[in-house]
Amino acid sequence: MPENNQNPLTFVTSTVGNAAGGVSKAAGGIVGAAGRGVGDTVTGVTGDTGKPIGDALSSLGNGIEGGAKSVGDGVEDAGKGKKDFLSK
């Protein structure tokens, strides 16, 4: 519910921004964990031969997770009306 002096539009924008940012970060976390899991599995099954591929998959998962977190943080900041959310 909006606070006493809060514009209802600001409240809705903030709520939607926080929700979308949270979903983005959660999805990124899931994809990142899955990428690391697949990478570790490939490395474990194939040993030294598949280690470069396993490491690459793990790194890809980490990159996706980091990117989704950054996007989620930006969406949340935009929803809060922060003016410098693009400069992170």
Image: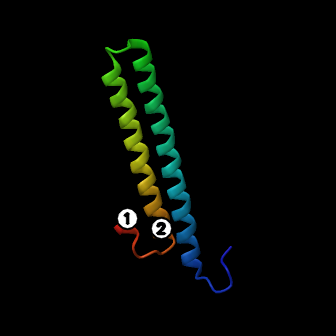
- Whether residue 72 sits left or right of residue 49 in the image: it is right
N-terminal of the pair, mark 2 or mark 1, is 2
Quarter of the image with the C terminus in it: bottom left
Residue at point 46% right, 44% down?
A: 28
Q: Amino acid at mark 2?
A: Asp
Residue 6 point in image, percent of width and height: 61, 82
Residue at point 59% right, 79% down?
A: 8
User: In the image, which disc is placed on residue 88?
Assistant: 1
Quarter of the image with the N terminus in it: bottom right
Residue 34 point in image, percent of width and height: 48, 32
Q: Give the tally of numbered discs.
A: 2
Residue at point 46% right, 38% down?
A: 31
Q: Residue pushed farthest front?
A: 48
User: In the image, which disc is placed on residue 9?
Assistant: none
Where 44 sits versus 39, above or below? above
Q: Are marks 2 and 1 in contact (CB under 8 Å)?
A: yes
Q: Specify few, some or many for label 2: CA neighbours under 10 Å numbering under 14, 14-19, or 20 or more.
A: some
Which SS class for mark 1?
loop
Q: Quadrant of residue 46?
A: top left
Q: Amino acid at mark 1?
A: Lys
User: In the image, which disc is placed on residue 77?
Assistant: 2
